[in-house]
Image: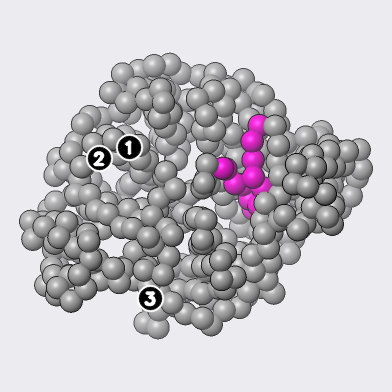
């Protein structure tokens, strides 16, 4: 069966499966356009050859913290001194070729590609052109130069890149957060509130005025309330290589998504994989699950043609698991002297060591234009100036002079430096 026939057969089987009922604990099922949450999709055996199996939930003692293993390029942007930035309040960073947009819960700041401040986008308030509290991540329409801002009230406010107000509309239906597919279509991804509905929506597509185009329904939710002790805020949805990928919390099948198709692309496996009925439990022992950092919905999964990088945790540790698609091998981050997260006493190991330019730690929490990003606080660079300059001298790199100049000029009162990583 050739690839086109397989895809046709796959889509057809999803539609046909809507008439069947089955258990909602099947781990490799996905979502179908159906009014029943009990609908179940069984993947045909002859289609499974096209699906990449990744053992991300496996026990792994192959430790490697070095950023150079996965990074093809790094760059640094010193953000303007004024207005001041509180790193702990930044909830999203979004890039275009010529702009950097930085948001907190209550503000949006625009910079050019060199970090020079341009303007503030919108303002905080209760008016029709204002936002009370921003729901991240920001959504950018690059072609039309528009910024879509989701307010906690489910209002969408649209601004131009220059800050001018464009329009506003209200979301209906799902509780999900918007993800811009193209200039006319958004995806609403499943959140905690959606998982409690019966039937539970898997993903919904709307137009740029908020009108529903299509909804796919979950096979897995709702689950019994006594099993819902802990849930991620929203399902991971990410892009790479001009495609969009989506994973439902607790399930193991990653789908390549578009308005007209939800096609299985990857299956996540491993002996430490949680069953669906375990995925929402507060305590899971040594079993593993994918997590996004609180307030940072794009920080759970990073993917390139060569690697898949997943932020995992269990009762004992947080770390990154890296799967090399080419070599079909796993390695993970491990830090012998890692500190503990006070609330859970789990070891914090979810960061890489920048052995390329800075000698500092890199913990990616932002994702835009297929690039992983983090802010390096100015006070950290200032306090470690000598160590950084010594590292640069001993480890020459094409970006060393760029960062060296930043280090030499920075004070502890400056704004943070944006570190941008392109994966291999």
Q: Nearer the viewer, residue 125 or 387?
A: 387
Identify the residue shown where x is 28% and y is 68%. Answer: 356
* Distance between mark 1 and mark 3 Cα atoms: 37 Å
Q: Residues within 10 Å of mark 1 (few under 14, many from 20)?
A: few
Query: Where is mark 2, residue-wise?
Result: 113
Q: Position of residue 294 (x, y in %)?
A: 46, 53
The span picked out in magenta is 243-259
Q: Position of residue 221 (x, y in %)?
A: 74, 47
Q: Residue at x 51, y 61 (%)?
A: 306
Q: If you read the primary sequence from the N terminus, does the residue marked by circle 1 or circle 3 appear first? A: 1
Contact (Cβ within 8 Å) of mark 1 with mark 2: yes
In the displayed structure, would residue 56 be above or below residue 221?
Answer: below
Report the mark closest to the observer, 1 or 3.
Answer: 1
Q: What residue would you read off at disc 3? A: 339
Nearer the observer, 330 or 383 = 330
Please give the label number shown on residue 97: 1
Q: Is residue 102 above or below residue 315?
A: above
């Amino acid at each position: 069966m050739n690839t086109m026939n397989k895809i046709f057969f796959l889509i057809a089987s999803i539609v046909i499966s809507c008439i069947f009922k089955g258990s909602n604990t099947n781990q490799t099922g996905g979502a179908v356009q159906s009014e029943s949450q009990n609908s179940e999709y069984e993947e045909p055996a002859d289609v499974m050859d096209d699906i990449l199996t990744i053992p991300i939930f496996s026990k792994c003692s192959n430790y490697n913290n070095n950023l150079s293993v996965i990074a093809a390029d790094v760059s640094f942007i010193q953000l303007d001194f004024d207005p001041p930035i509180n790193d702990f309040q930044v909830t999203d960073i979004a890039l275009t070729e010529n702009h950097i947009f930085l948001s907190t819960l209550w503000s949006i700041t625009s910079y050019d590609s060199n970090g020079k401040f341009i303007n503030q986008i919108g303002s905080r308030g209760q008016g029709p052109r204002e936002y009370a509290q921003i729901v991240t991540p920001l959504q950018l329409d690059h072609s039309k130069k528009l910024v879509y801002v989701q307010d906690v009230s489910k209002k969408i406010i649209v601004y131009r890149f220059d800050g001018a107000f464009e329009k506003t509309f209200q979301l209906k239906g799902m509780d999900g957060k918007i993800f811009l597919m193209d200039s006319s279509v958004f995806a609403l991804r499943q959140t905690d509130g959606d998982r409690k509905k019966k039937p539970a929506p898997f993903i919904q597509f709307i137009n740029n005025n908020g009108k529903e185009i299509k909804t796919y329904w979950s096979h897995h939710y709702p689950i019994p309330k006594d099993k819902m002790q802990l849930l991620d805020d929203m399902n991971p949805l990410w892009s790479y290589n001009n495609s969009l990928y989506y994973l439902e919390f607790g399930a193991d099948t990653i789908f390549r998504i578009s308005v007209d198709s939800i096609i299985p692309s990857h299956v996540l496996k491993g002996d430490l994989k949680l069953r669906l009925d375990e995925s929402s439990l507060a305590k899971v022992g040594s079993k593993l699950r994918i997590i996004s950092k609180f307030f940072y919905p794009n920080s759970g999964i990073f993917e390139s043609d060569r690697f898949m990088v997943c932020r995992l945790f269990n009762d004992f540790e947080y770390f990154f698991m890296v799967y090399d698609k080419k070599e079909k091998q796993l390695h993970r981050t491990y830090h012998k002297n890692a500190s503990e997260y006070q609330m859970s006493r789990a070891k914090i190991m979810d960061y890489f060591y920048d052995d390329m330019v800075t000698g500092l730690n890199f913990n990616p929490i932002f994702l835009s234009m297929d690039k992983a990003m983090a802010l390096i606080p100015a006070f950290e660079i200032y306090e470690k100036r000598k160590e950084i300059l010594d590292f640069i001298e001993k480890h020459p790199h094409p970006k060393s002079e760029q960062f060296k100049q930043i280090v030499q000029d920075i004070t502890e009162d400056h704004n943070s430096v944006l570190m941008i990583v392109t994966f291999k």
